Image (cartoon, coloured by chain):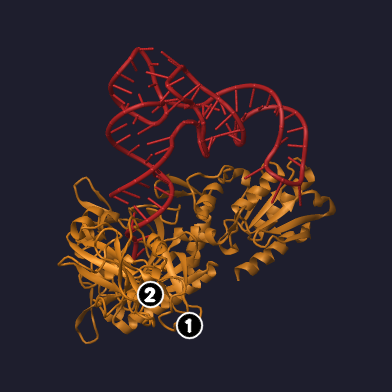
Chain colours: A orange, B red
RNA sequence: CGGGGCGUAGCUCAGGUGGUAGAGCGUCGGCUUUGGGAGCCGAAGGUCGCCGGUUCAAGUCCGGCCGCCCCGACCA
């Protein structure tokens, strides 16, 4: 490809709206163009990357025995009503009507579609097991699209579905996909952690997430470097700590005027936050107040809370509600003088803490040196705290690492969550009708482009790993007016094409610095610089990744680069 | 969904107190230049997000709407 003819236009100015490096660089280097909020056009170089990612995924899926098909984007309401998700999926579903008033959604995921297809075709246990997959555009009306391709409203996903006769067989399908995913992320050169995960609203019994470690992403993963345990932070269990061995001091009432936050209170009383009982009031289903008590140095994990109370319909109480219920402001809620009918949850972190600071539901006063057993009785303990760096690993007790990441893959053992309500049955060996056991397996294909840039860039631009680079080699002709240089560059370009290298030839009439800067920004793994060394029969080969430079004889340059590329792709 | 901000040339942005729109970069033409986003000369390019109001006069003031970004909540 000659760059002078190629649809690749970089920006010199920094895109003002982008913050995440991947978003900024993909815009600046001319890979993506926004169409509207969370909706992006993939330009030719980005599409080349996307296709390479897809093909790596395809190869590993096919190797695992999965078969590719193509479902539809437009999905009728009726199927979604069968599983109840037309309503429960909520506002995230893009809905529309046809001219006759029939309702559809744009598929955000395809469990209903695939289950419908399979129930119409499959009859017998002889036809199982089966894994089907597609690479398809998906639509989710995200509340807040963010960071370019990282959270888009229209995006490309690989979704696979497994169908088995029994739990054991389903488990084998699940494990097969798990291994395929590990191979895929290795081949994509991504640093990805496989973590245990919550099954969430998709349902099912077992689930793993594949999280790329990045600074921009929605996932938080906790992992143990000792035993290999890794899980989404929101499901890491935290046990009660050891009881503190500390002399119990006499309880005292202390005036704490205008002290509202834990931090202020800790400074005012000169105690660590871990000695303060924090009380947070939630309103469940818009009517039932629940008071959550937690140690002052900890935060509430609302995902854990959701699983405890069994609904996501809850919110923090408003100031007025606190005043109405407790007769005091936020910051002065505690366990003493509690009004009737308020449910109280005790987080494990509070167990065994001595000489606590506790509010007493009276403005501007706290008790200090409050002790369990003597001054109050514990209620029901639960685990609602967010996991933090250095919390003990639930498997082996070693301090955990907690890192931010980007969810690239998610696999679920679904069981009969979809086959049962949709009546996807097969006849088993014993002649009985049984629901198919299902699994589903997603990979965010377009999001992988961003994850790659997050993990492979520097201050000058992107550094694509060779297997996914839009072009493997950039041949830069420095002086377009120099006939000798031009002849050499043309010859090398044709030779590279001939030898099957993905090559772009920068034949544009631009200054040397301009071309170098573009090459760094767009991030081709190798470049050949055709410049003044041509007089000595040489060109310069450079690696974007390592920064290494080699002077190579003109005739050997392409073979030299080809060898490097082959090595990278192994 | 709560909070904040922005919308003027392709991009980044400037345009006290209302007076009919500018810069840098990019683009086009010419000359010069070619190992790190070159220089000089010239030119084109705008329904100032949309609708309404106030006014002799609105990019500027007022009202409504739309779009986009950021923080949080949310996020198989």
Specify the farthest residue to the bottom.
A430
Image position of A312 (left or right of A514): left
- In front: A86, or A377? A377
A568 up-or-down from A316: above or below:
below
Q: Residues within 10 Å of mark 1 (few under 14, many from 20)?
A: few
Image quadrant in which the C terminus of chain A is located: bottom right
Query: For residue A270, what is the image quadrant?
Result: bottom left
Residue A501 seen in this snapshot:
yes
Q: Report the residue at 64% width, 61% height from top.
A: A545
Letter of the chain that mark 1 sits on in the rendering: A
- Tell me the residue that label 1 is attached to: A227
A387 up-or-down from B74: above or below:
below
Image position of A401 (left or right of B56): right
Specify the farthest residue to the right.
A536
Disc 1 + disc 2, Cβ < 8 Å:
no
Query: For residue A72, what is the image quadrant?
Result: bottom left
Label number found at residue A236? 2
Residue A80 lies, in percent from the top left, at 23, 61
Letter of the chain that mark 2 sits on in the rendering: A
- In front: B20, or A31? B20
Specify the farthest residue to the left.
A340
Instruction: Give the spatial CA distance, label 1 vs label 2.
Output: 15 Å
Residue A377 lies, in percent from the top left, at 24, 78
SS under mark 1: loop
Tell me how many marks there are: 2
């Amino acid at each position: 490809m000659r760059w002078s003819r190629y649809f690749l236009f970089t920006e010199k100015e920094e895109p003002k709206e982008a913050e995440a490096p991947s978003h900024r660089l993909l815009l600046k280097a001319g890979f993506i163009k926004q169409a509207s909020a969370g909706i992006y056009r993939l330009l030719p170089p980005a599409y080349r990357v996307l296709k390479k990612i897809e093909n790596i995924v395809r190869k590993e899926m096919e190797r695992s025995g999965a078969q590719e098909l193509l479902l539809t984007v437009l999905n009728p309401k009726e199927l979604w009503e069968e599983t109840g998700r037309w309503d429960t999926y909520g506002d995230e579903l893009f809905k529309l009507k046809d001219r006759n008033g029939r309702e559809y959604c744009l598929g955000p995921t395809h469990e209903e579609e695939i289950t419908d297809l399979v129930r119409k075709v499959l009859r017998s246990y002889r036809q199982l097991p089966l894994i089907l997959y597609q690479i398809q555009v998906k639509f989710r009306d995200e509340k807040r699209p963010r960071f370019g391709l990282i959270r888009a409203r229209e995006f490309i996903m690989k979704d696979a579905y497994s169908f088995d006769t029994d739990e054991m067989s389903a488990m084998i399908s699940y494990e097969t996909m798990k291994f395929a995913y590990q191979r895929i992320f290795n081949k994509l050169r991504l640093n990805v952690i496989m973590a245990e995960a919550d099954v969430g609203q998709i349902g099912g019994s077992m689930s793993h997430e594949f999280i790329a470690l990045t600074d921009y992403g929605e996932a938080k993963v906790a992992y143990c470097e000792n035993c290999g345990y890794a899980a989404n932070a929101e499901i890491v269990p935290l046990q009660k700590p050891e009881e503190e061995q500390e002399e119990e001091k006499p309880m005292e009432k202390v005036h704490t005027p205008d002290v509202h936050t834990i931090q202020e209170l800790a400074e005012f009383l000169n105690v660590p936050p871990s000695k303060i009982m924090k009380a947070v009031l939630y309103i469940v289903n818009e009517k039932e107040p629940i008071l959550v008590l937690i140690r002052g140095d900890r935060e509430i994990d609302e995902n854990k809370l959701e699983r405890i109370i069994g609904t996501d319909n809850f919110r923090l109480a408003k100031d007025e509600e606190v005043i109405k219920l407790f007769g005091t402001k936020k910051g002065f809620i505690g366990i003493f003088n509690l009004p009737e009918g308020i449910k109280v949850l005790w987080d494990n972190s509070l167990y065994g803490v001595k000489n606590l600071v506790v509010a007493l539901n009276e403005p501007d006063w706290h008790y200090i040196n409050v002790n369990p057993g003597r001054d109050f009785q514990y209620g029901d303990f639960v685990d609602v705290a967010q996991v933090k760096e250095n919390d003990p690993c639930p498997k082996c007790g070693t301090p955990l690492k907690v890192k931010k990441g980007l969810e690239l893959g998610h696999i679920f053992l679904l069981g009969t969550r979809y086959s049962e309500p949709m009546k996807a049955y097969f006849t088993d060996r014993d002649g009985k009708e049984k629901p198919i056991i299902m699994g589903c397996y997603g990979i965010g294909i377009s999001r992988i482009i961003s994850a790659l840039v997050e993990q492979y860039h520097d201050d000058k631009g992107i550094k694509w790993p060779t297997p996914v680079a839009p072009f493997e080699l950039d041949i830069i002709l420095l002086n377009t007016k120099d006939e000798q240089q031009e002849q050499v560059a043309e010859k090398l370009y044709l030779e590279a094409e001939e030898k099957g290298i993905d090559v772009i030839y920068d034949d544009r009439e631009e200054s040397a610095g301009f071309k170098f800067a573009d090459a760094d920004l767009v991030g081709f793994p190798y470049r050949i610089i055709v410049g003044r060394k041509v007089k000595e029969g040489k060109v310069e080969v450079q690696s974007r990744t390592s920064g290494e430079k080699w002077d190579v004889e003109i005739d050997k340059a392409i073979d030299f680069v080809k060898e490097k590329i082959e090595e990278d792709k192994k």
